[in-house]
Amino acid sequence: MSSTDTKTTKSDVFFVPNAMDAEFDNFWKTVSCFAANNFPFEERCDFVKKAVDCNSSTNVIPYMRLLACDLKCINQFQEMIFIALFVAFCFQILVILIYTINVYYSPALKAVSRFLHMNEHLAGVTLMAFGNTSADLFANLASVERHVPVFANNLSSALFVITISGGLICYISPFKMNSYETVRDILFLLLATLLMDYFASHHFTLSYDELKFLIVLLVYISYIIINVADVYLLQKTIASTRAKMQKLLDEKETPEIALKLQELERKLEYYSQDTRVEILEKSSSISITRIRYTTMRMIRNPRVSVNRRYTRTMMLDYTQSKNQGIFRDFFLSLRPIKCQAWKQAELLNRVLLLIRAPAVVICTLYIPLVDYELEKHGWNKLLNAINVVVNPALSISIFLSFMHRKANVLWYISLQNTLMYGAYSFVLTVPFAVFILFHSRTDVPPSYHWVFTIMNLTGSMFLIFLCATEIDTVLEVIGNILSIDDNYMGATVKAFTGNLGTLFANTAVAIHGYPKMAFASAIGGSFFTIVVTGNTVAYVRSLVGNRCDDHIEEYGEIAFIFLNMALFTILLWSTTLGFFARRSMGLYSIGLYVVYLLFVTLVHEEVIHSFSKDVRVKSAFADI
């Protein structure tokens, strides 16, 4: 061996890689896809092909790769044109989102709530709140390695839901709140928010992370248990009151017994106001066209329950064949636009019908419709037999593709590897579909039609999640192209786009006659977002060694203060107005959020100082 080789070997022995070397070794794994905007247009395609984040952050369409490689954007003018096309695509997705919520999600939610013997409040803080916010939990868990102020974004998200969604519920559909439940939920939310803020602003050792996680989790578990126990005790009280009334009716009628009966009837009427979700006719909901003045109560129609037995059997005719009109019903259900609706629509409505047409076909083939207000409860024999096979297989395949995709591979490319897992569901679904075709009739839904409600709810939730996250992704791309600060985007724009599904779902449920459920969902969903999502993400980060000391940052402080203001003012005006949610209070909540946006914007533009302390400047590598 030569002396030169010997010297090289010795130098290699004493070579110690530093933090900067490790940074370059993992550059393509850690660099943000939006860093491509700092490169010349002709070099961006190579960058987005190598950056792992450009694929891992993609939901349906890889927008950065589409701009740089496929559309070959070469200047800012073309970039603005394509951004306008992205906004138009956002509107298309928004139409699909609204259609899914109105036609599928809302009826399924009511049906499942009634099947589980829930009242409006319990259904709102459990089923609806979990359905609206669980997607955010999984999305945040999938990106625990990214340095994102999750707690700050959760506070901004909760503030948006409480003020905008809750405000619109009060404005569109004024209602009488459940006094005890509302006060209890708001106090629980205040406790959880203050507790999370305390843990986020105080630094603890790693050994206390598990204890913090369990303490906060116990608060949420206690909240759910108390809500469930409250409904159970209410139902027991109603049964006890009815038993006492029956006992008094069996006795000889006297003035004292008549007074006792009158008192018990009054209590029973009060207890029975919100015992179980009723399926209401949509025509009995509040009409926005009957609004008179901003601060006056809206004129409301009486709540009319649907005769479910009648709507189920209204087309039943045993003289006809079991398969009478099976293909006719199937092809009519696939119509993207109904002829009568097209004839009655004006020009703008026809445009909306055309935009909505793809959503109609997608939802019809994927989600089985169960709506007790429709004739036959939405039953379509051949179509539902197809839904039974398609819905579970497609849901399982796409979900596993999201979960098990590699960092540098798009999810629908890895879908070919997960289709086999979706095909495993055929073992159960194909025999069930064959059984449906041989057993059921076309003119009446079978007794096991409730099974389709589960697929209706889960399928619509899955589609809502895809639409909402895709809109969020599009606007995030646009914001980064326009060089808008990420933290500012998280406190404002992403708080809106991330809760589009929640906003439209709560509003639709309120319009359909269930404002108590919608408002309870606004409180319960915010509780889940702050406590479960924020707490779980912080704990998982500590497990993977990616602790983030700055959970809240400057915009989070602002959101924390405004959220507490919103909650305290809800307590104030609800107790002052006898727990009647007036339209003026809805406008106040929306106005409070507008003030928050103004405050955050002034902080972003450095016109005023935020509530947080200035960040201490640190060197990037060692003592450099």
Image: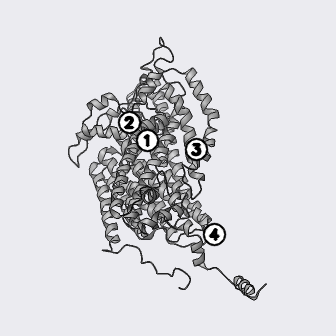
**Marks 4/3: CA distance?**
39 Å
Which is in the foreground here, disc 3 or disc 2? 3
- Relative to 344, does residue 193 appear above or below in the rendering? below
The residue where tag 1 is placed is 120
For image coordinates 75% across by 86% down, the residue present is 6
Q: Which residue is mark 4?
A: 207
Front of the two marks 3 and 1: 3
Q: Position of residue 581 (x, y in %)?
A: 32, 48
* Whole-number angstrom distance, CA of label 3 to CA of label 1: 34 Å
Contact flag, marks 4 and 1 (Cβ < 8 Å): no
Locate residue 9: give its quadrant. Answer: bottom right
Quadrant position of the N terminus in the picture: bottom right
Q: Position of residue 26 (x, y in %)?
A: 58, 69
Q: Element under label 4? A: helix
- Residue with the mark numbered 2: 266
Q: Give the residue type that dot 3 points to.
A: Ser
Relative image position of residue 603 (x, y in whole percent): 34, 71
State yes or no: discs 2 and 1 in contact (Cβ < 8 Å). no
- The local secondary structure at tag 2 comes to helix
Tell which of 70 and 382 is nearer to you.
Answer: 70
* Label 3 sits on residue: 397
Secondary structure under the numbered disc 3 in the rendered image: helix
Q: Residues within 10 Å of mark 3 (few under 14, many from 20)?
A: many
Q: Is residue 186 left or right of residue 138?
A: left
Alpha carbon of mark 3 to alpha carbon of mark 2: how far? 54 Å
